[in-house]
Amino acid sequence: MFSGPMSFDILIRNGQVLDGTGAAARVADVGIHGAAVTKVGWIRTSEAERTIDAKGKYVAPGFIDIHTHSDVGILVEPTAECAVRQGVTTHVIGNCGDSPAPISDEYRELAAHRFEYYSKAGDWKWSTYAEYLRFIERQGVGINIAGLVGHGAIRLAVMGFEERPPTGAELDSMKGHVDEAMRSGAFGMSTGLVYPPGCFAAAGEIIELAAGVARHGGFYASHIRGERETIVDAVKECIAIGEGAGCAIQISHNNPKYGGLGKAQEIQKLWESARARGVDVLADNDAHTDFGPPLSHALPQWSQKLGANDLLGLLQDSEKRQELKAEIMADRTPGAGYVGLLVHERFDRIWLLRCPSDPSKEGLTIATLASRRGVDPWTVYFDLIVEEHDRAVGLFDYMDLEEIKSTLRHPLVMICSDGWVAPKEERTSPTAPYQPCTFGEFPGILQRFVVEEPVLTLENAIHKMTGMPAARLGLGDRGLVRAGFAADLVVFDLPRVRDRATNLWPHTYPFQNYPHDFPEGIDWVLVNGQLAVEDGRPTESLTGRVLRHPGKSGESIRPRPSGRTGISRQGRGRRSKSRRPRSPEPVLGTRSMG
Ligand SMILES: [Zn+2]
């Protein structure tokens, strides 16, 4: 690679290198030149602008978070400090059907409402997926970003929140958006089949769209149609969609939620039998049992489009309350996982995190508050939304920790956070959203599931955070510590690794790790060869890149092998490692930025 004596910009010496393949650690030096690792092994020269002594520490590929919701957060907080402080160097965005692009003029307001929380990101200045990616690029990013296009965003851009199948023309328009996104560098398409408008789409519609993803060699990621009572059927549907479209499948955060607890083994068998017939299916999961949404988010999907005033008006009508309760309990269009606690009336597992109007309620469960008030818990639940002007936030503890461990151990499962890049002030504010996954997911796995309890071996945990998601994404030059690969690296001191963002159920109040703190023991992090964390301190560097899916290189030009009728399903899901020049971006209409 180099003529003459080798020199490095950064030399990481004597670390125990976990290469990301799942192989055991071995002591080696890692030499970095520019944005790439140029040598791994025993390096004799001491010529380097900077030398990091990693003796006694581990050196691993930067963690790749396959499932995040950083779509707008990365614009608010481009340094992504909450990610790099964990050793995470790449976020996959656009999950659960939600991406901020495409956006149509017709439904722009409705689309903006979906990301309302980050309204400080400013005006929505993009329409197409390509424009959105360029917008991120212009801002600069501290981590690499790999995008999925959300089916929900596409459906919304074409037909708003219409609860019906698309017309032929609408379906064609949606296909056009898929194609535009894939040609612009999206890695695939996601669905969120419990959220509006994804929940209004039948499998046939999604197969048609996913076929467009498959043509570009991308993958289909899904928050399936119910992760509780219907989880088995929902997994079957997800696999049928991928199989029908000839598309690789990533089943998102696929651990059973309350109402479906105990079904992990049954769904694991479905993944395995699909693999056995050549379907490229993988899954991911995070390690937290709880989630902290506003109480109103557990109400039926159609109510999510109501403004606060309309919602409060609705809840002041006792007849409407009865209808809402009946609709939630009937659960005909399954809501998100945590809604299972309402369906099964487990108000003892819904704990009040924030009640800004009357904080004395914080730290109580809905069940406790109901007995104190001498009313039934449903009344308290609805009352709280009204009393707190829709600012009441609950902590829904809706998963089983033992089952999460069994999911994480499964060889087809990689580790994700399901978190997002959060603005700095969110971490320290007493009214910060509860988001342990955003600040502590990866160190939490290392601390609790590798060191404190041997759920995963260290090398397997690292593989599930690096080489495995990189392979799913088709990134031929990331996810491993190897010469020629991008210098996305993390150096950590395993015995010192602490997650300072997670609080385990059953809760005591006040919390030990809330507001959240950054983890400890993640000492050095490099993003494309530049330091993002320097001896435990963030550098606020912006050396991340907006990654573009390499496309289906090779297959389109390689002649079909003789004696075979076509490319196997498994082969279709795998992408070649070489990159090809991007095709020119198509122009959709006359919309422009700003
Ligand atoms: Zn989801």
Image: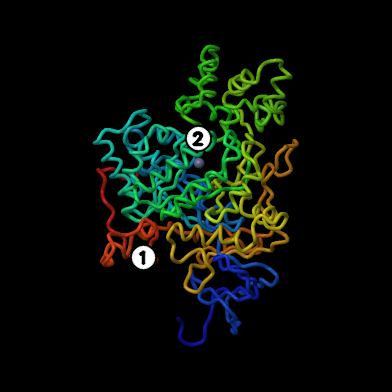
The image quadrant that residue 256 belongs to is top right
**Disc ID at residue 230:** 2
Quarter of the N terminus within the rendering:
bottom left
Which percent across, then down, holds residue 492?
65, 63
| Secondary structure type for disc 1 | loop
- At x 46% / y 50%, what residue is drawn? 250
Q: Where 485 sits versus 436, above or below?
A: below
In the image, what residue type sits under mark 2?
Thr
**Disc ID at residue 529:** none
Badge 2 crowding class, 10 Å Cα cut-off, few under 14, some 14 to 19, many 20 or more, is: some
**Disc ID at residue 579:** 1
Which percent across, then down, holds residue 168?
24, 36
- At x 64% / y 71%, what residue is drawn? 16
The Cα–Cα distance between marks 2 and 1, rounded to whole angstroms, is 40 Å
Which percent across, then down, holds residue 513?
70, 44
| Total number of numbered discs in the rendering | 2
- Would residue 37 be found to the left or right of residue 138 on screen? right
- Would residue 426 be found to the left or right of residue 550 on screen? right
| Secondary structure type for disc 2 | loop
In the image, what residue type sits under mark 1?
Arg
Which percent across, then down, holds residue 582?
31, 60
